[in-house]
Image (cartoon, rainbow, N blue to C red):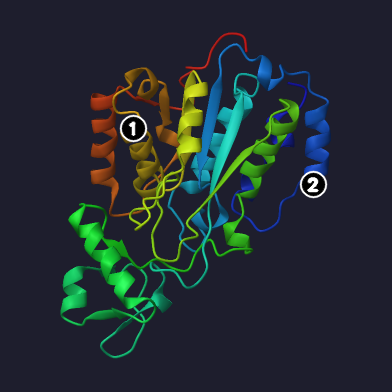
Amino acid sequence: MKTAYHEIVNVNSIGARENPFLLHDILRKADEENLTPSVQNKERVLFLGIDVQQDFMEQGALGVPGAHGDVERMTGFLYENMDRISNIAVSLDTHTPHQIFHPCWWIDEAGRHPAPGTPITRNDLDCGRYRAIISPVASRDYVEHLEQEGRKTLIVWPYHCLQGTFGAALENQFANMVYFHSVAKKAVTMRMVKGTDPLSEMYGIYRPEYDANNYINLEALNRLEQYDKIVIAGEAKSHCVLESIRQILQHYRKRPEITGKVYILEDCMSSIPGFEDGTDQAFEDFRKTYSVNLVKSTDGFLQGNP
């Protein structure tokens, strides 16, 4: 390409509040590239960036250790494969303060809100250790269904990705590269907002952990069939990435021709501390059961002409 990587991404500014580049200048350079338009790519490749947002960067409200290095490698991968990637989709975790996984939803026996990191179980509700001060009946129903279905225990998280705040935005250097691709490849970036239901967590990007209406984003899931390769990266590996991949594989569990198209960039995602072992085992199970591809961003699995 005519434009150098360092003209799009400043690795020292990953996660920073100030973007040293003007997007107008970056997109002007993108418009001057002579890349294959997305619709003309012979091999259809989708890059799916899950929750690459400021609050999940290392100094963010729910910072993931290793996230800055992940973004550096992720943007490097996008740059090196710019002409081979047909489309980019990004998910955006999006919340308000009053949601079931935030502190102000709950109080303990002394009337105090639980600290971030606190698990809340059905036993905690039975013994009165914690109680919901908003929608208590529906909150209990949610906790019970999580346990019945063997899902992750409800965790109280720090306030994060609040609508309209800096923390909810795409990480700025990642955004530079994503929008550069959009203009250079004449491809509209697909955006998926998730997590707005106050009564449910939504780690995966296609459906909540549990909700009474059984919502599932079938349109986005079915769109995956259009691609020859689906490349996935993002934060956090242990939660939103893991559950998003699990939802894809469950949806296509009887179609190995689809699950075998999934490529997971293991060096472009990191786990929340304490969840590493179970996460790594889950990814290995995905490989064995569904033939997904566990790769590194430098493995060169996207080769040949666009």
* Label number found at residue 288: none
Q: Nearer the viewer, residue 299 or 219?
A: 219
Residue at point 48%, 21% (across, down): 229
> Is 6 displayed left or right of 107 in the figure?
right
* Sequence-first tag of 2 and 1: 2
| Position of the C terminus by quadrant | top right
The type of residue carrying mark 2 is Leu
- On screen, residue 269 above or below 137: above
**Mark 2 lies on residue:** 22
> Is 119 displayed left or right of 166 in the figure?
left
Where's residue 12, x and y in %? 63, 47
* Label number found at residue 249: 1
Quarter-wise, where is residue 288 in the image? top left
Residue at point 57%, 55% (across, down): 54
Where's residue 39, x and y in %? 67, 19
Residue at point 72%, 19% (across, down): 37
Question: Taking the image as drawn, is residue 10 in sight?
Answer: no
> Is 134 displayed left or right of 274 in the figure?
right
Quarter-wise, where is residue 169 in the image? bottom right
The type of residue carrying mark 1 is Leu
Judged from the image, the secondary structure of the residue bearing numbered disc 2 is loop
Residue at point 23%, 38% (across, down): 281
